[in-house]
Amino acid sequence: MRFRYPSSFLKLLLVGFAFAIVPLLWVFVNANIAFDNLSTQSQITISNAVEVTRASHILQEQLHLMERSSRQYFVLQDEVLFSNYNKASAKFNEVLTQLKQLTTQPAQQKNINVLSEKNSQLNLLIYEAKQSRESKAGFLDNFSQLDKQVELIIKENNMAIDAASSQLVLNTQITQKKLFLQSLVLIPLALLIAGSITYLLARPIRRMDAAIKHLGTGQYDEPIAIDGPGDLRILGQRLDWLRTELKELNQQKQQFLRHVSHELKTPLTAIREATELLHDGIGGQLSIQQSEITNILRDNSIRLQKMIENLLNYTRIKTVEQKLNLSRLYLPDVIHKVLKAHALSIRNKQLLIETNDNVNEVVADEEKLTVLLDNLISNAIRYTQISGQIKVSSHQEKNKWYIEVSDNGPGLAKADQDKLFDPFYRGDTLHKSLINGSGLGLTIVKDLIEAHGGHVALIPSYQGAHFKVCIPQLELK
């Protein structure tokens, strides 16, 4: 089932935040409740233990006061002493009632009842002896039995307090384990939800980033559709509109370049023919100065023709799908044919050409291979100084073959190397060398090599420019 995005990016962010934080809030609230219950239970346990302990000690103190007052009364017959006995007895009964309310164990309740009955019986005997004015009251020794009963109650109370403390510790451990298990389940769940929301947020952004990169590299054919929140979908529609506008503008640019190139080629051909006629002396013998002017016209018309041919090749590469017309070629013949085409320029500049062919037969498109070699060699010739040196070599490694063209000219500035193969790029540095002219020669080289599945690179060198072409060995179908 397809996920339905909210209407806005902010709403998706808020929904994702809510889903991610709910499990953590549940753990937090549950932990607070559990610790609050433990706190309440511990307060009740401690308070009850303190009250029971205090009541037990008071009970024991009042019992000793009752025994001392009653014995002194029967010896001295002083009503003040008997009044002290009554006060201690009343306090004893009050504390006994309080202790009975604090205890919940049946055994403790039974011992308290036994103590209360024994105290009542002893109290009755004391009152009867007082009425009969007896001076000897042997039943007073029964206080020792009451004392033992009180000690028994205190001991049981202490045991009950220890049991309650142990139970409190056990409850704490159980609660801690329960919270740990809950955290063990819910925290990964929260992280999973957060990861899912992050993926849902990142997916349309990645799609937009890829679409923008395609637009930046001139890939206008694939429609742009962003599946995401409403505002991102609208932005995707804007990008698709921009794509269509750029595609139309690029088509207009290619059409303009194609038409201008064709329009320039016709008068340029006439200029070249007229220049050649003058150079050959058809219109009459030329003076030395006139010959120099004719040579300038001739060289620059050749250069202009090369620039127009590059424009035509570039527009054809960009507008027509590059289909290779593969055939088996003898690579040294192709290299020598290109060098022969530039023989006049090589001779005029007195260049030393060094070839080193270690590749014989290759499978490639002869026309495209000739064009790319022509651009590399013509660049080397143009920017190599008089009496300079150009080296053209080839070699093979496994299922790939390489062509290297190097010269000892001024080379290329480092600031221009990153954009060397960009169309129409011309550097602003002092060493413009390889990026003079139309700025299309190396772009065409790169496109034609990539059409063969290969690549071209500028190799670092101490002097001049050094290009290395790598093309895989193709197979004829």
Image (tube, rainbow, N blue to C red):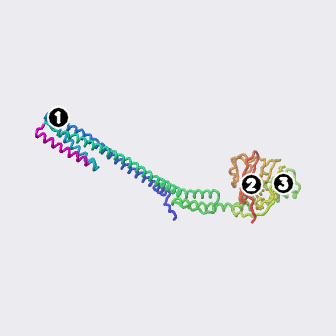
Q: Is residue 111 magenta?
A: yes
Dot 3: element:
helix
| Front residue (pair 187, 357) | 187
Dot 1: element:
helix
Q: Is residue 222 left or right of residue 23?
A: right
Q: Amino acid at mark 2?
A: Val
- Tell me the magenta residue range: 109-134
Mark 1 Cα within 10 Å, few/some/many (few <14, many 20+)? some
| Front residue (pair 302, 132) | 132
Percent x, y of residue 64: 22, 38
- Mark 3 vs mark 2, CA separation in Å: 26 Å
| Front residue (pair 433, 321) | 321
Q: Is residue 338 magenta?
A: no
Percent x, y of residue 326: 76, 63
Answer yes or no: is residue 126 visible: yes
- Mark 3 vs mark 1, CA separation in Å: 148 Å
The rendered magenta stretch, by its main secondary structure, is classed as helix
- Looking at the image, the residue that sits furthest to the top is 76
Q: Amino acid at mark 3?
A: Leu
Q: Amino acid at mark 1?
A: Gln
Which disc number belongs to residue 344? 3
Q: Nearer the viewer, mark 3 or mark 2?
A: 2
Mark 2 Cα within 10 Å, few/some/many (few <14, many 20+)? many
Q: Is residue 387 left or right of residue 5?
A: right
Q: Nearer the viewer, mark 3 or mark 1?
A: 1
The residue labelled by disc 2 is 469
- Mark 2 vs mark 1, CA separation in Å: 126 Å
The residue labelled by disc 1 is 72
Numbered circles on residues, count: 3
Q: Quadrant of the C terminus?
A: bottom right
Q: Are marks 2 and 1 in contact (CB under 8 Å)?
A: no
Mark 3 Cα within 10 Å, few/some/many (few <14, many 20+)? few
